[in-house]
Image: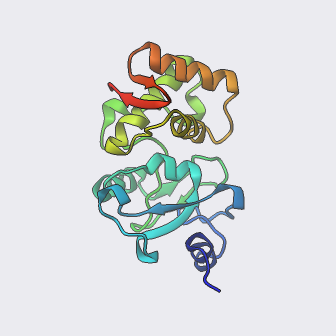
């Protein structure tokens, strides 16, 4: 009986997140492509690791070079953005983001925990969408789940609706018949 890729990765990684080495709950498991699929990366196990959904959302479709830049900017320390892990020593093979790509300082939002005001949250979402390049969500449903995944400790339905409304009212996102286009 063949196993699913995510199950294989979790087995090989001992049930731990590739980045923070903390136990990874089933509900948080996701596959991160080291070389993003949108950048030509394959689905084979050599290019994939299991990690939490929030790390996967932050890495998005960054290039391998951008991921290495994130690693270098971490200076060997990793704090899981979902709050599950404590600081760990990173090795060059790990890509531990705590913010949207540090290679673009102007777009660097405050840490998740510090993004408390509406403006901070909107700036964080916009920066994340910009760093996704051509891999931005194309449907309202996918955009909604993407924004939700950026806040692993939860975001209320009212806050989520407000963020989506702000994206539209500022003209950064255009929604027509559940299809999303961007003017970032």
Which quadrant of the view contains residue 114?
Answer: top right
Residue 63: x and y in percent read 31, 54
Residue 141: x and y in percent read 56, 37
* Residue at the spot 49% in from the left edge and 55% down from the top edge: 77
Q: In which quarter of the image is the C terminus?
A: top left
Residue furthest bottom in the image: 1
Question: Does residue 175 sit above or below 19 in this rendering?
Answer: above
Q: In which quarter of the image is the N terminus?
A: bottom right
Question: Does residue 141 sit above or below 26 in this rendering?
Answer: above
Question: Does residue 42 sit above or below 182 in this rendering?
Answer: below
Residue furthest top in the image: 169
Residue 36 can be seen in this image: no
Residue 122: x and y in percent read 49, 23
Disc tally is 0
Q: In this view, does 134 lie to the left or right of 116?
A: left
Q: How is the protein colored in the picture?
A: rainbow
Of residues 163 and 4, the one nearer the viewer is 4
Q: Is residue 6 left or right of residue 167?
A: right
Residue 31 can be seen in this image: yes
Residue 47: x and y in percent read 41, 71
* Residue at the spot 48% in from the left edge and 36% down from the top edge: 139
Which quadrant of the view contains residue 33?
Answer: bottom left
Of residues 64 and 167, the one nearer the viewer is 167
Q: In this view, does 114 lie to the left or right of 48?
A: right
* Residue at the spot 30% in from the left edge and 62% down from the top edge: 40
* Residue at the spot 41% in from the left edge and 36% down from the top edge: 129
Question: Does residue 52 sit above or below 127 in this rendering?
Answer: below
């Amino acid at each position: 009986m063949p196993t699913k890729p995510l199950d294989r990765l979790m087995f090989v990684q001992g049930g731990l997140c590739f980045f923070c080495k903390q136990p990874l709950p089933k509900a948080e498991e996701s596959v991160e492509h080291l070389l993003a699929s949108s950048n030509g990366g394959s689905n084979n196990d050599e290019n994939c690791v299991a990690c939490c959904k929030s790390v996967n959302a932050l890495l998005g479709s960054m290039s391998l070079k951008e991921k290495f830049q994130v690693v270098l900017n971490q200076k060997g320390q990793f704090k899981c953005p979902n709050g599950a892990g404590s600081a760990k020593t990173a090795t060059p093979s790990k890509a531990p983001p705590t913010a949207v790509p540090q290679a673009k300082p102007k777009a660097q939002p405050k840490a998740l925990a510090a993004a408390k005001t509406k403006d901070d949250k909107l700036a964080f979402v916009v920066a994340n969408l910009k760093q996704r390049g051509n891999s931005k969500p194309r449907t309202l449903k996918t955009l909604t789940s993407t924004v939700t995944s950026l806040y692993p400790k939860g975001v209320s339905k009212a806050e989520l609706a407000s963020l989506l409304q702000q994206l539209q009212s500022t003209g950064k996102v255009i929604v027509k018949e559940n299809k999303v286009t961007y003017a970032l």
